[in-house]
Amino acid sequence: MGRALRKTAGVMGAGAGAVALLGLGYAGITWYRYGKVGRGGRRNHLVDRFIPKYEVREVHQTRVEAPADVTFGVAHELDLRRSTIVRAMFTGRELLMGGEHAKREHPPGFLAEVLSLGWRILAEEPGRELVFGAVTQPWHADVEFRGLEPEEFTAFNDPGYAKIVWTFAVDPAGPRASVFRTETRVVTTDPESRSRFRRYWSVFSPGILLIRYETLRLVKREAERVASATPPLSKVSLAGQEVP
């Protein structure tokens, strides 16, 4: 029995060590690659207005079998706090950073939640895309987001901050399909902030990116559920006549 327990403990210890090594390896690679962002791919001119040059750029998307307006509406009202994964990521950050547990009320709906945190809408294409922005110091345990007016955000260069812009957008892909995408860009305002954010991103980017993937999954699932409950119109009534 004792031998079996020692063997099990050894296996678990080896597994934990492997996970730790993988984590350190990821952090090291991320730290090394920081700022080495490719400039290719599709450009987003709405985001280019606010952060044309960046240190971090992440783009994620998923195809959704639902019309664009349905997908956009679902993303607008999504409640991320209902996700076990998202709650775990926020709790993990609080534990690692030593921050206080947030006891405030969370308004229903994704947009209301984001705005209540301090983010500001910088630009939008109605029914298709929203661009959010804030200046912040995410390397602090109890992070605060400071939203600014679009022109003020563009000109902001006070030392000690990271400027972050992110979007959610929906592109039509046919009458009953769409592509939901999100993009995040970050630039810092001075060398010390760059160094601090670089360390922060090296450690916490896996959790941040996991939240992005979870957002894509939840929007896709809910939009397709709503679309499947709303059959497409096969006939249109025109002046009392049914037109096939």
Image (cartoon, helix red, strand yellow):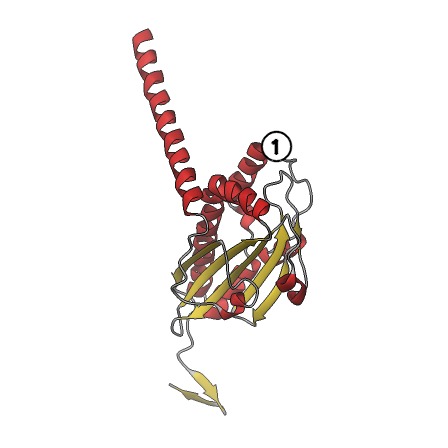
Residue 30, relative to residue 18: is it above or below?
below
2 and 234: which is toward the camera: 2
The extreme front residue here reads 191
The extreme top residue here reads 2
Residue 23 in the image: state x and y as whole percent: 41, 35
31 and 208: which is toward the camera: 31
Q: Could you tell whether 6 is left or right of 85 in the image?
A: left
Residue 90 in the image: state x and y as whole percent: 56, 41
Residue 44 in the image: state x and y as whole percent: 47, 67
Picture residue at 46% right of the left edge, 56% below the top? 57
| Any part of residue 63 in sight | yes
Q: Amino acid at mark 1?
A: Gly
Number of other residues with Cα within 10 Å of mark 1, as a class: few under 14, some 14 to 19, many 20 or more? few
| Any part of residue 108 in sight | no
Q: Could you tell whether 117 is left or right of 48 in the image?
A: right
Name the residue that disc number 1 marks. Answer: 98
Picture residue at 41% right of the left edge, 59% below the top? 61
Q: Quadrant of residue 119?
A: bottom right
Q: Quadrant of residue 98?
A: top right
Residue 206, relative to residue 157: is it above or below?
above
Picture residue at 47% right of the left edge, 51% below the top? 212
Residue 20 in the image: state x and y as whole percent: 40, 29
Q: Please give the count of numbered marks on the rendered protein.
A: 1
Q: Secondary structure at mark 1?
A: loop
